[in-house]
Image (spheres, grey):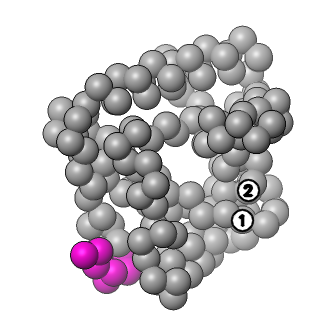
Amino acid sequence: MKKYKLDFEFVPEECWFYNLRKILKPADWDRVRKDAYARAHGRCSVCGARARLEAHEVWSYDDEQALQKLQDVVALCHACHEVKHISRAQLIGRGADAMEQFMRVNDCSQMEFHEALAEANREYLRRNRVEGWTTDMTWLLDKFQIEIK
């Protein structure tokens, strides 16, 4: 499968609604997101656009150990963030915009977009067969000395 600069990120259903903005104190969340914006020098970390930035959590998944691990928080423009969360974009009627952003950033065709989305959906379905996901947030402790209880 081709690797794209901008891709989709589907979270296993067991891990939905577990995000830093909800679980961190507001001051801690501000530290984390502002650090991402500073590292990106005010630009989207994917497409390079100078735009209002949004913080996006980057997770890795170990299907064999049922482990979701926080890897980073990056700065994205709204358009790239919508691609990362394509299902939500589609639900709110912005799927076509997200598709256009994916194709523009990745310099690819609509067929390639649909192939990549189908592969992301297959991976999502495979991950949802895994039960008992746990979450590793050591990145927060290592980088910011923030501990999650």
Question: Disc 2 versus disc 1: distance between alpha carbons?
Answer: 5 Å
Task: Tell me the magenta residue range.
Answer: 143-149
Question: What residue do we see at 75% from left, 54% from top?
Answer: 78
**Secondary structure type for disc 2:** strand
Looking at the picture, how far across and down is residue 9, in whole percent? 52, 39
Contact between marks 2 and 1 (CB within 8 A): the answer is yes
Question: Could you tell whether 57 is left or right of 114 in the image?
Answer: left
Q: Is residue 77 left or right of residue 61?
A: right
In the rendered image, which residue does mark 1 sit on? Answer: 53
* Label 1 secondary element: strand
* 139 displayed left or right of 86: left
Q: Position of residue 22 (x, y in %)?
A: 48, 69
The answer to if 146 sits in the magenta stretch is: yes
Q: Earlier in the sequence, mark 2 or mark 1?
A: 1
Q: Amino acid at mark 1?
A: Leu
Residue at 29% in and 74% down: 148
Horizontal side of 27 relative to 117 (left or right) equals: left
Residue wearing tag 2: 77
Q: Is residue 50 magenta?
A: no
Judge the density around disc 2: few (<14), some (14-19), many (≥20) Cα neighbours within 10 Å: many
Q: Residue at x 26, y 58 (%)?
A: 136
